[in-house]
């Protein structure tokens, strides 16, 4: 808890916070257990299969995009991700999705690369 | 107030095309994000933080403050037109705003609320310009012990620890503090909570966490709930957007009361715009001759909370600028943004970066004027835009979040972390854990740790330094009172004799 000079060490705050969190967690578990035993615990709200599927598709697409950034570059990958999400999840027509994704990618290029001069990975491009 | 400095600030804003441009962009985006249900000012600023990376400090500050101001204006549009508040502070605007729209007075309701917001915002600006430098000068005597106890007080007050059921707020605050401790200790150089990952040695940037818990979690929630938008039934003829002077004057006292309530509640840490709007509404109901008409489309029931909502922005910025202590989740993000662009919020900021701060305060006034124009003349455009933009929002937010987080350190690992924090934020929101305390803990943790270490170093590890110095003792006592307030309230409610005697 204290450093060699006798002052607060690096571990002081993490240890204090961990102890408080552990106490809170135990008390929460005990109260949830006692509520469940008394039958006053609220049942968890059920989520629709479609919403779970949407979240799974979204997260896996983002992770795939993450892997493709080095290869295809940041803006192209994010443009493709945007297009795929508009088609698959939002069920927007192909024409509108292409137009919106292309326009967004061009806007991002103009703002971040041209205007603000930020460096982005370009991959094979 | 340093009037000359403020005038110089106006001069730098009005002669800088880039500042005006970022101000316009900020208020437009702010109005849109404010109007879109679920997004709100905190998420709006968090998502747009990356835009500030390439900007100079003044433009960055103007952009963030304009988004904040614009979001406070925008929240009312969806409240009035479709009975869906853009953010928590706009909930009260649905009470009388939506009934007014149903009576065919949507244009009147929108313009009246815009005028009320303008007057509230102007009072907030005056208060900010007058009080910030005065408080900052007073805080110059603060040393590390005073800062430590002040931040402790701010953390307790703002994170809801003093509320009736503080469990979730405490856990959220502690998680924020814990995340902030990840990385190499700045004093001893030892790695903390890095789990052997080299990428965590530099710590986790607050932008990654903020964008994750606000932006990405919003996307995950949107994917679950779908579009919250409904068809806007009310038509907004251009002529209806301009109420006559008589109608405005009849609301003047309500607007004045709302503005004052909003400003003073805004200054208090932890109170915020939501409480301000509810207080202004109930105050108006109390002074009204026909309180039973409230909820049926009373103009004062709309104008007072709207004025309070916008006046609270100026109030909330006072402790952020003058003490470096954020009073809410939104100002915590703003504070992080200020530090990111190289400013050091606190008593010395007016001396070290006075030109930037005074120009930003002047920009706050300019944004307020531009918002009045934007929110009256262009309201039909915003009404259509929020409906048309809604289906595109979830993927667009995800793209902006990913791009923004990558640009922080050119690191794909950060995007992975952002996705992780997106899920953390999502589950916290699903389980009704407040997110704002997490961000407050995250922002304040390094400062708390640093000032505590400095104080103890000053006293040779003697903890009595916190009670021996009067200002520090005052904050400590206030913190203890706040902590025990729920218990005192509980005891008071259990003992009916106390009530009877009173």
Image (spheres, coloured by chain):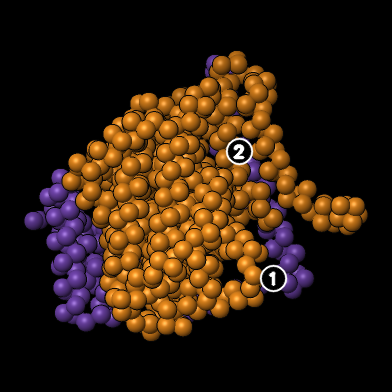
Q: Find disc 2 in the rendering and name its residue.
A: B153
The subunit carrying tag 1 is A
Secondary structure, mark 2, is: helix
Density class for disc 1 (Cα within 10 Å; few <14, some 14-19, many ≥20) is few
Between B66 and A100, which is closer to the camera in this rendering? B66
The C terminus of chain A, quarter of image: bottom left
The image quarter containing residue B157 is top right
In the rendered structure, the answer to whether residue B123 lies left or right of residue A94 reads: right
* Chain ID of residue with mark 2: B
Give the image location of residue B316, x and y in percent: 48, 46
Instruction: Identify the residue shown where x is 56% and y is 49%.
Output: B265
Question: What is the number of callouts on the image?
Answer: 2
Along the line of sight, the residue nearer the viewer: A87 or B80: B80
Decide: few, some or many residues near mark 2? Use Cα within 10 Å; few <14, some 14-19, many ≥20. Answer: many
Name the residue at 47% across, 78% down: B100
Query: Where is residue B55 shown, x and y percent of the image?
Result: 23, 42
Q: Which residue is mark 1?
A: A41
Res. B101 visible in picture:
yes
Left or right, A1 with respect to B208, comes to right
Please determine whether, in this image, residue A78 is positioned above or below residue B49: below
Chain displayed in orange: B
The chain whose colour is purple is A
Apparent side of residue B126 relative to residue A4 in the rendered image (left or right): left
Residue B87 in the image: x percent, y percent? 46, 64
Q: Secondary structure at mark 1?
A: loop
């Amino acid at each position: 808890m204290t450093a060699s000079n006798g002052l607060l060490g690096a571990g002081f705050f993490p240890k204090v916070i961990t102890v408080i969190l552990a106490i809170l967690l135990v008390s929460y578990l005990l109260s949830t257990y006692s509520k469940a035993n008394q039958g006053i615990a609220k049942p968890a709200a059920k989520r629709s299969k479609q919403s779970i599927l949407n979240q799974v598709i979204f997260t896996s697409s983002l992770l795939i995009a993450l892997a493709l950034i080095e290869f295809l570059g940041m803006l192209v990958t994010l443009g493709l991700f945007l297009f795929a999400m508009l088609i698959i999840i939002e069920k927007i027509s192909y024409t509108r999705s292409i137009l919106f994704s292309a326009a967004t990618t061009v806007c991002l290029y103009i703002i971040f690369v041209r205007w603000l001069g930020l460096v982005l990975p370009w991959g094979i491009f | 107030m340093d009037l000359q400095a403020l005038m110089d600030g106006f001069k730098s804003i009005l002669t800088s095309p880039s500042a005006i441009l970022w101000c316009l962009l900020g208020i437009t985006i702010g109005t849109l994000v404010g109007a879109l249900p679920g997004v709100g000012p905190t998420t709006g600023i968090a998502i747009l933080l990356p835009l500030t990376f390439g900007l100079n400090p003044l433009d960055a500050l103007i952009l963030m403050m304009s988004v904040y101001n614009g979001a406070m204006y925008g929240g009312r549009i969806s409240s009035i037109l479709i009975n869906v508040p853009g953010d928590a502070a706009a909930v009260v605007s649905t009470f009388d705003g939506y009934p007014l729209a149903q009576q065919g007075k949507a244009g009147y309701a929108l313009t009246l609320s815009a005028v009320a917001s303008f007057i509230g915002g102007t009072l907030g600006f005056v208060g900010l310009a007058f009080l910030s430098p005065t408080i900052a000068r007073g805080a110059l005597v603060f040393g590390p012990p005073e800062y430590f106890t002040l931040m402790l007080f701010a953390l307790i007050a703002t994170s809801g620890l003093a509320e009736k059921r503080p469990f979730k707020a405490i856990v959220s605050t502690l998680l924020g503090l814990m995340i902030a401790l990840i990385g190499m200790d700045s004093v001893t150089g030892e790695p903390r909570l890095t789990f052997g990952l080299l990428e965590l040695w530099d710590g986790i940037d607050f932008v990654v966490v903020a964008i994750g818990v606000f932006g990405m979690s919003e996307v995950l929630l949107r994917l679950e709930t779908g579009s919250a938008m409904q068809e806007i039934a009310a038509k907004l003829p251009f002529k209806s957007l301009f109420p006559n002077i008589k109608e405005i004057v009849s609301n003047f006292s309500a607007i004045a009361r709302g503005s004052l309530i909003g400003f003073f509640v805004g200054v208090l840490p932890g109170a915020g715009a939501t409480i301000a709007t509810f207080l202004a509404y109930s105050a108006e109901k109390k002074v009204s001759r026909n309180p039973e008409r409230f909820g049926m489309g009373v103009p004062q029931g709309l104008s007072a909370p709207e004025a309070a909502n916008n006046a609270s922005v100026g109030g909330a910025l006072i402790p952020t600028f003058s003490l470096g202590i954020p009073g809410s989740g939104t100002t915590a993000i703003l504070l992080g943004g200020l530090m990111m662009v190289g400013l050091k919020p606190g008593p010395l900021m007016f001396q070290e970066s006075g030109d930037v701060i005074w120009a930003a305060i002047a920009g706050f006034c300019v944004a307020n004027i531009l918002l009045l124009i934007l929110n009256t003349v262009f309201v039909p455009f915003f009404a259509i835009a929020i409906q048309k933009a809604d289906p595109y929002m979830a993927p667009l937010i995800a793209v902006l979040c990913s791009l923004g987080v990558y640009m922080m350190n050119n690191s794909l690992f950060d995007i992975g972390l952002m996705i992780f924090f997106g899920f953390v934020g999502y589950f916290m929101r699903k389980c009704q854990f407040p997110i704002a305390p997490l961000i407050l803990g995250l922002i304040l943790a390094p400062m708390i740790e640093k000032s505590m270490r400095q104080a103890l170093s000053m006293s040779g590890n003697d903890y009595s330094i916190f009670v021996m110095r009067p200002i520090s003792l005052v904050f400590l006592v206030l913190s203890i009172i706040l902590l025990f307030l729920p218990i005192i309230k509980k005891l008071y409610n259990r003992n009916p004799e106390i009530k009877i005697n009173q």
